[in-house]
Image (cartoon, helix red, strand yellow):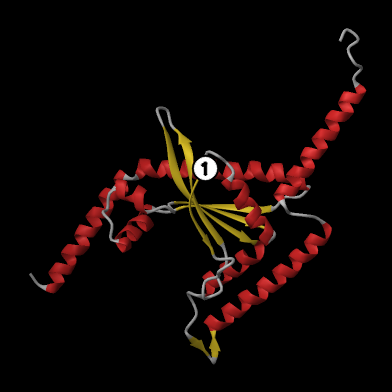
């Protein structure tokens, strides 16, 4: 068999394998879609509660993403793992994705901490690119959690990748994503890699200065907010106790 024929045969086999994988995985992707919706609802509920406690919304907005079967298939090939549904569930943990954009760096860590306290969530992996940015300047905090999804006859924990970013981090990442497909290593004497890294450092400095200003007017500490709320409730209870007449029969 010629090299050309052999290549054509491999391409045909890969196409056939992908077609079979895509058909078999349709119902499985519905599970990941359900996990995304459940996770998004949790963040919306959490944001509403934090608004009540802080009088502001730490979450600027939420984005969601479900990987396509083609993207998952290609990733499994890169990982050199079996092309099966069981292998997909075991090895590909970012099929479902949620991106949470917040105002300040403190909000990132506060939300991660609160999330870790939810006893029905399982934190699988944490990658902190805020404290340790990637070489190109990328900053974000990635957390993979497993969230329970309830079906008619069972409960199953489904992985979701959550990316926490500030508005500033998302601004840089969005522009970098666009530029990296157009850049050359050197463009008329400009080193795009170094420029993007420098821009990231400048944005980080501005971001921290804005956070200092924010700290001057209010706290973003979730535990402090919870403590204050507990004190408010105690004061309310005292007020009620002092207002209601004592039972004379006692």
Residue located at (92% from left, 17% from top): 245
* Residue in front for this viewpoint, 2 or 207: 207
Q: Position of residue 121 (x, y in %)?
A: 52, 42
> In the figure, 237 relative to 221: above or below?
above
Residue located at (68% from left, 58% from top): 106
Count residues near mark 1 (Cα–Cα under 10 Å), then give few for <14, some for 14-19, many for 20+: some
Q: Position of residue 185 (x, y in %)?
A: 47, 85
Q: Is residue 122 left or right of residue 8?
A: right
* Residue in front for this viewpoint, 200 or 62: 200
Q: Element under label 1?
A: loop
- For this orientation, the residue located farthest to the bottom is 189
Residue located at (83% from left, 58% from top): 217
Q: Is residue 71 left or right of residue 170?
A: left
Residue located at (54% from left, 44% from top): 39
> In the figure, 116 relative to 139: above or below?
above
* Residue in front for this viewpoint, 214 or 196: 214
Instruction: Say which quadrant the C terminus sits in.
Output: top right
Q: Position of residue 211 (x, y in %)?
A: 74, 64
Q: Quadrant of residue 16?
A: bottom left
Q: Position of residue 163 (x, y in %)?
A: 55, 57
Pointer 1 residue: 121
- For this orientation, the residue located farthest to the front is 250
Q: Quadrant of residue 82?
A: bottom left
Instruction: Say which quadrant the N terminus sits in.
Output: bottom left
Q: Is residue 166 left or right of residue 68?
A: right
């Amino acid at each position: 068999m010629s090299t050309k024929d052999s290549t054509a045969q491999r391409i045909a086999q890969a196409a056939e394998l992908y077609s079979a994988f895509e058909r078999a995985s349709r119902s499985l992707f519905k599970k990941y879609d359900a996990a995304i919706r459940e996770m998004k609802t949790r963040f919306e509920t959490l944001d509403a509660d934090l608004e009540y406690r802080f009088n502001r919304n730490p979450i600027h907005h939420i984005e969601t993403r479900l990987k396509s079967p083609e993207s998952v298939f290609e990733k499994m090939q890169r990982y050199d793992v079996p092309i099966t549904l069981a292998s997909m569930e075991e090895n590909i943990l970012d099929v479902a994705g949620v991106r949470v954009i917040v105002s300040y760096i403190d909000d990132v860590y506060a939300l991660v901490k609160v999330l870790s306290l939810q006893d029905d969530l399982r934190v699988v992996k944490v990658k902190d690119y805020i404290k340790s940015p990637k070489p190109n300047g990328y900053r974000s905090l990635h957390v993979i959690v497993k969230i329970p999804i309830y079906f008619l006859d069972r409960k199953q924990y489904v992985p979701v990748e959550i990316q926490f970013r500030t508005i500033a981090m998302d601004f840089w990442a969005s522009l970098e994503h666009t530029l990296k497909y157009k850049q050359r290593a050197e463009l008329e004497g400009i080193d795009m890699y170094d420029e993007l890294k420098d821009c990231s450092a400048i944005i980080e400095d501005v971001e921290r200065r804005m956070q200092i200003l924010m700290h001057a007017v209010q706290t973003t500490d979730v535990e402090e907010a919870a403590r204050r709320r507990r004190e408010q409730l105690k004061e309310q209870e005292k007020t009620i106790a002092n207002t209601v007449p004592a039972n004379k029969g006692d």
